[in-house]
Image: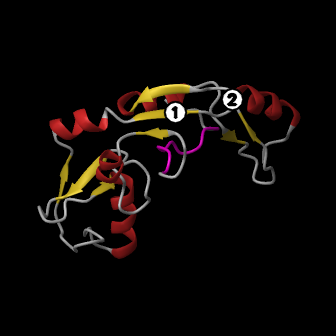
């Protein structure tokens, strides 16, 4: 269960120095909407396209455009990740390096670590406050701030 102070979890974006993978795997698993590593991956079912997308990106795109189509080839079908693709994507190593955590993790371990990492950056939920820091910092901060 996520703490209400925690922000949305996501994988690092390409361009960050936190992704260690072959160039072909980076291209193979880069979301065609957000340009990050696919999270809960879906793939265009058009064999000539086959581009990857995050499920959340597809859902957001469907709400915005009132239809679920591949933004590249306009195909309406998507498929889930295959077992072979799961093995390939798990070879991608991710580094979480915020506020003192420098863990190298497999793709399959990253989100669980991110959700539970004591170094994870979270933001104060007070709408008039821009404070951010790790969980211990935010807990101490909440003692000194009136939450609106």
Q: Badge 1 is on which residue?
A: 95
Q: Which residue range is magenta in the image? A: 5-13
Q: Earlier in the sequence, mark 2 or mark 1?
A: 1
Query: What's the residue at 40%, 27% (across, down)?
Result: 109
Is 36 on the left-hand or right-hand side of 148?
left
Could you say which disc has been placed on residue 135 in the image? Answer: 2
* Quadrant in the picture for residue 81: top left
Is 144 on the left-hand or right-hand side of 130?
right
Could you say which disc has been placed on residue 133 in the image? Answer: none
Residue 147 position in % (x across, y down): 79, 43
Can you say whether 53 is above or below 112 in the image?
below
Which is the main secondary structure of the residues drawn in magenta? Answer: loop
Residue 92 position in % (x across, y down): 36, 36
Query: What's the residue at 82%, 33% (across, down)?
Result: 141
> Which residue ends up furthest to the left in the rendered image?
47
Query: What's the residue at 25%, 37% (across, down)?
Result: 88
Residue 10 position in % (x across, y down): 48, 44
Can you say whether 21 is above or below 148 in the image?
above
- How crowded pointer 1 is (Cα within 10 Å; few <14, some 14-19, many 20+) is rated as some
Can you say whether 59 is above or below 122 in the image?
below
**Is residue 44 covered in magenta?**
no
- How crowded pointer 2 is (Cα within 10 Å; few <14, some 14-19, many 20+) is rated as many
Q: CA distance from mark 2 to mark 1?
A: 19 Å
Q: Secondary structure at mark 2?
A: helix
Q: Nearer the viewer, residue 76 or 148?
A: 76
Q: What colour scheme does the image use? A: secondary structure
Query: What's the residue at 25%, 59% (across, down)?
Result: 51
Q: Secondary structure at mark 1?
A: strand
């Amino acid at each position: 269960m996520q703490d209400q102070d925690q922000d949305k979890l996501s994988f690092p974006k390409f361009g960050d120095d936190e992704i260690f993978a072959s160039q072909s795997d980076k291209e193979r698993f880069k979301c065609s909407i957000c340009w990050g590593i696919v999270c809960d991956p879906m793939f265009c079912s058009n064999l000539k396209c086959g581009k990857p997308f995050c499920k959340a990106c597809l859902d957001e795109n469907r709400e915005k455009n009132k239809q679920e189509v591949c933004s590249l080839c306009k195909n309406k079908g998507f498929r889930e990740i295959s077992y072979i693709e799961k093995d390939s994507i798990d070879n991608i190593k991710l580094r979480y390096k915020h506020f003192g955590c420098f863990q190298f993790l497999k793709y399959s371990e990253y989100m669980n670590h991110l959700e539970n990492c004591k170094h994870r950056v979270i933001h104060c939920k007070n709408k008039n406050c821009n404070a951010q820091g790790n969980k211990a910092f935010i807990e101490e901060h909440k003692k000194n701030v009136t939450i609106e």
